[in-house]
Structure formats: structure tokens, C-alpha cells
Image (cartoon, rainbow, N blue to C red):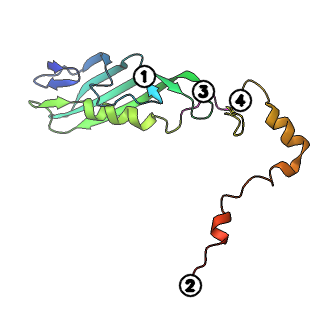
Amino acid sequence: MDVKSGLIFQLVDLRPEGVCLRGQISFADLDIQEEDRFSFPAALEYDLLLTPLGQNDVLLRGALQARIAIVCDRCNSHGELQLQVDDVCHQYKDAFGKILDLTPDIREDILIVFPQHFLCREDCRGLCLQCGEDLNAGSCACESAAGAQPAAAESRPDPWQGLDKLKLP
């Protein structure tokens, strides 16, 4: 097996017990870009085993893990999230003698566990919609005032009010 670069290999010969692949690959090499809500303080770590399967097929099994720095979608606090894929499993048919690029499959495996919404913790209460106070730190004045006057919610403008004036044929 000839290593071309990163997770790209020329499969010439493969021991029956397989080859262990351990290392790191940057998210840029996986074509996953940082955004405002998350960044990558470290590379993705992989621990994989590439074994022959029959005459020409190859089986890839292993695990991936990565840390991502996040900004909570509810309260805007900064935190860190651990991504873990324990069941990487891919079969490559007629792989011997060819160049095998594992990058697209590893990228897909990590994107599947990538969260759609980032939370600093499961029970994050977010920010007060009126004053912007972090409700994880405690109650705000708006919350206690709303509890004392239940009619306060009724005095808010109705976002659907404009539709009541709409005349349809």
C-alpha cells in the first residue's frame, strides 16, 4: 500500500490482517469550512483499519473524533462540542491496484453527526426576548414583571394583525 497523501492510497498489496491507519486530517482537507457559529480548534482524529475482503475488495472500519468550538444558538455563549463516530464502516469493491480516496466517505461520516443547532447545554434557557439578559444566569426583570401582570403578553403587537385587514376575492 502506497500512501499518496492524507487519506488517499494506492492499493498494491494489503496484509491479511489489514493496515491500521491513525492520524489527523484538517477540516479544510475534508472541504468543511468554518462559519460564524462554529470553528475547528483541532484537526479531525481518525483510527481506522483497512482489511482485505475477498480477492479485490477492501473493508474500512474504525472511529473518528473531533472537537468544535461553538456559539450557542440560544444564548450566544461560547462552548466546545465533542463529535464522535464509533462505527465507520465502508466497503470498496475492486479496489486493488487502484487509487483509493477515503476522504469523501470520512467527510460524510463526520457531517452526519454534525449538529444542526448548537447548544451550550441541553437545558439552555437562552436570552430574554425583551431585554436580552442571559436566562441561564438567572431571572431578569422582564420575567418577574410578566409574572405579576399576565395581561402584559396580551398588550404585545399581534404579528398577524395585518392579515386581518387583507381582503381576498
In-front residue for pair 57/153: 153
The quadrant holding residue 5 is top left
| Residue at (53% x, 27% y) in the render | 71
Which residue is the site of mark 2?
169
| Proximity of marks 3 and 4: CB atoms separated by less than 8 Å | no
Where is the N terminus found, in terms of image quarters? Answer: top left
The tag on residue 43 is: none
| Mark 3 or 4, closer to the camera | 4
- Label 1 vs label 4: CA separation? 34 Å
Residue stretch rendered in magenta on the structure: 118-123
Task: Kindly identify the amino acid type of the residue bearing the numbered disc 2.
Answer: Pro
Residue 128, how many percent across, how many down? 71, 36
| Proximity of marks 1 and 4: CB atoms separated by less than 8 Å | no
| Proximity of marks 1 and 2: CB atoms separated by less than 8 Å | no
Looking at the image, is mark 1 or mark 4 earlier in the sequence? Answer: 1
* Left-right relation of 31 to 123: left
| Residue at (43% x, 22% y) in the render | 66
Res. 96 in view: yes
152 in magenta:
no
The tag on residue 120 is: 3
| Mark 1 or 4, closer to the camera | 4
Which residue is the site of mark 4?
133
Which residue is the site of mark 1?
65
Residue 116, how many percent across, how many down? 49, 39
Where is the C terminus found, in terms of image quarters? Answer: bottom right
The kind of secondary structure element at disc 4 is loop
